[in-house]
Image (cartoon, grey):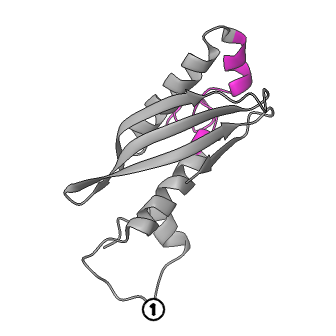
Amino acid sequence: MGIERTLLERLARPKSAVSRTMQMNVTEIVRSVVNHLRKMLNTKQNHAPAHMDYGIPDPSDVAHSLPDAIGTMQKCIRQCIEKYEPRLTNVNVIHVESELDILTLRFQITAQLVHSKERVPIVFDTLVDSSGRIKVKE
């Protein structure tokens, strides 16, 4: 069908030898969503001229809003996903405390993947390291 990959992904890497089908490949959709989340969450607000609110604030700027920094970061991640990733719905971002690494923030993102008429539950782990880089894992 084509919903598995974004338009830019299809333009960058067209699949010429694959026949078209009406069935969606959930694995490909999840892979595309994860790639988009990685790019989006590592984009700082005010750096995308077409949409100045695309991305999230710089984590180092959010860190200065203690003691509400974790709640602020959760809210920013959730709002960004809700606005710019239409393939996900019912987004929830939860802070997961880690006693082993105090310099890394860990969030668990739960959502539902909009897949045809079904809603497929999906979970991502998100790590914000000390440099402000965000890693998204399936």
Left or right: 64 as drawn, with respect to 85: right
In percent of the image, x 42 and y 45: which residue is there? 85
Q: Position of residue 24 (x, y in %)?
A: 32, 71
Residue 53 shows in this picture? no
State left or right for residue 103 relative to residue 54: right
Quadrant of the image occupied by residue 68: top right
The residue at the far left in this view is 117
What amino acid is labelled 1 in the image?
A: Ala
Which image quarter: residue 27? bottom left
Name the residue: 35% across, 70% down.
2
* Front position in the image: 5 or 123: 123
Q: Residue at x 54, y 37 (%)?
A: 108
- Label 1 secondary element: loop
- Residue for badge 1: 17
Task: Give the image location of residue 5, x and y in percent.
Answer: 44, 65
Tell me where the magenta segment starts and ends, as one range. 40-64
